[in-house]
Image: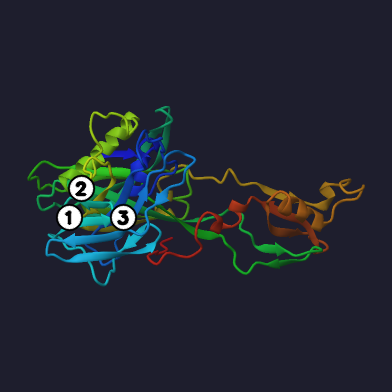
């Protein structure tokens, strides 16, 4: 198995191909116009398939240029053309009621740009893919910071059933996890020391993330043995809020061709070498897309055709807690409790009012007021409590809407 993180050195291709990069690599193209980037994948599922078209940008000061107004079709081996409608600038989609990929069929992508340039992909067969037998996890460690630090955590693994003479595989995954903020906002401050409960306390939310790693594997020709304990993803337990409440990962398994395997393999090697993808390379990062009238034109991306199997794993906190791993702490959160008497001479020799405190921390300093504290004898508000926004409202970093597939296990 080969595995690597996509870092900035090769993102110019993969930021558009798998849409997971944080810092796009944007070299100036010497003597070339910007290059066409194609992001397309069709699978054997009843869903709408998407092809995204764009062009590389010339330098960091330029924004990505989408390719709009193109004619995009997918032709199959029985002579049917499936037309894609442009649903957004540079985004072309099939009709899920009219087209579903089928194992054993072959497909070819055709693109004609508004300017009349014509591109075609190699013919791609949809190969069968075996079922995923299980997705599971175990305690593990990983070296960080140039192998100077050891991180404790869990690693996700996969077992796959034997394939029907499949030789090449690729995996991707989608993470979702439930988390809570430590100091949820429970009250709104009105004026003159008046507070009212908020309608909805944004304490629990969900975050999602898609894989940014290349996970590929090849087997010997004719090998029928199942894949066992393939490492998918490592989670450092104290580095994120993934394992605070409940974590879920959906792993997808694709059967790919030899050519596509070589594409991902070469992409890994370029990434590991830190080389400029437009410089002279000991190996090409080839695409399966070509300009019909100008075969020398370089096209970026890959038209992917694959059957897919998937399996989801849930990890509740109750299971993770038994492993006695380090916990994640919200060390960036600041909880501030202030009484007007904390500033006895702040306003012309007299303490500020509660309104003044609210303005100081919430309007001028961008903190959130979260709740009052009352005097135990008089029952009046004595203190106002403030915190940083991300520690009071979970929707600032996640979504308050529970995913349709979610099952609370704790």
Residue depth check, mark 3 versus mark 1: number of the one nearer the observer: 3
User: Under tag 2, what secondary structure?
Assistant: strand
Task: Tell me which corner region of the image, top left, top right, bottom left or bottom right, holds residue 261.
Answer: top left
Q: Left or right: 328 with respect to 372? A: left
Task: Tell me which corner region of the image, top left, top right, bottom left or bottom right, holds residue 112.
Answer: bottom left
Residue depth check, mark 2 versus mark 3: number of the one nearer the observer: 3
Which residue is disc 1 drawn over?
129
Give 36 or 23, whichever is nearer the viewer: 36
Q: Left or right: 308 with respect to 407? A: left
Task: For the C terminus, give its image quadrant.
Answer: bottom left
| Other residues around mark 2 within 10 Å, as few (<14) / some (14–19) / many (≥20) | many
Q: Earlier in the sequence, mark 3 or mark 1?
A: 3
Q: CA distance from mark 3 to mark 1?
A: 34 Å
Q: Residue at x 65, y 67 (%)?
A: 198
Whether residue 390 is visible here, answered yes or no, is yes
Residues at marks 2 and 1 touching, judged by CB atoms closer than 8 Å: yes
Q: CA distance from mark 2 to mark 3?
A: 32 Å
Q: Position of residue 67 (x, y in %)?
A: 37, 54
* Res. 113 mark: 3
Q: Residue at x 68, y 51 (%)?
A: 366
Give 380 or 64, whichever is nearer the viewer: 64
User: Under tag 1, what secondary structure?
Assistant: loop
């Amino acid at each position: 198995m080969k595995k690597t993180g996509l870092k900035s050195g090769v993102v110019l291709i993969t930021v558009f191909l798998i849409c997971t990069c944080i810092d796009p690599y944007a070299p100036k193209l010497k003597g070339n116009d910007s290059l066409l980037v194609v992001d397309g994948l069709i699978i054997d599922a009843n869903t709408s398939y998407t092809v995204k078209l764009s062009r590389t940008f010339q330098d960091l000061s330029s924004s990505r240029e989408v390719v709009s107004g193109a004619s995009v079709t997918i032709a199959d081996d029985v002579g049917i053309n499936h037309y894609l409608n442009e649903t957004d600038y540079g985004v072309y989609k099939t009709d899920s009621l009219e087209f579903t990929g089928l194992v054993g069929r072959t497909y070819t992508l055709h693109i004609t740009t508004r300017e009349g340039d014509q591109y075609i992909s190699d013919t791609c067969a949809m190969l069968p893919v075996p079922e995923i037998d299980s997705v599971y996890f175990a305690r593990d460690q990983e070296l960080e910071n140039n192998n100077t630090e050891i991180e404790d955590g869990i690693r996700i693994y996969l077992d796959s059933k034997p394939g029907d003479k499949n030789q090449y595989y690729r995996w991707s995954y989608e993470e979702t996890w439930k988390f809570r903020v430590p100091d949820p906002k429970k009250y709104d401050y009105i004026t003159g020391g008046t507070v009212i409960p908020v309608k909805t306390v944004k304490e629990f939310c969900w975050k999602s993330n898609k894989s940014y790693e290349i996970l590929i594997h090849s087997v010997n020709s004719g090998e029928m043995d199942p894949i066992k304990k393939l490492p998918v993803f490592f989670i450092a337990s104290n580095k994120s809020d993934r394992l605070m409440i409940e974590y879920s990962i959906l792993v997808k398994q694709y059967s790919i061709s030899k050519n596509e395997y070589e594409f991902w393999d070469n992409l890994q090697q370029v990434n590991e070498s830190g080389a400029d993808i437009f410089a002279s390379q000991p190996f090409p990062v080839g695409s399966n897309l070509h300009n019909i009238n100008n075969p020398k034109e370089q096209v970026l991306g890959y038209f992917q055709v694959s059957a897919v199997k998937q399996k989801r794993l849930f990890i509740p906190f109750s299971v993770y807690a038994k492993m006695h791993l380090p916990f994640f702490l919200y060390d960036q959160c600041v909880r501030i409790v202030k009484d007007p008497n904390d500033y006895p001479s702040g306003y012309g020799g007299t303490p500020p009012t509660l309104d003044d405190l609210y303005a100081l921390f919430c309007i001028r300093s961008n903190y959130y007021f979260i709740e009052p504290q009352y005097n135990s004898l008089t029952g009046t508000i004595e203190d106002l409590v403030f915190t940083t926004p991300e520690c009071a409202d979970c929707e600032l970093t996640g979504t308050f809407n529970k995913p349709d597939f979610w099952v609370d296990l704790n």
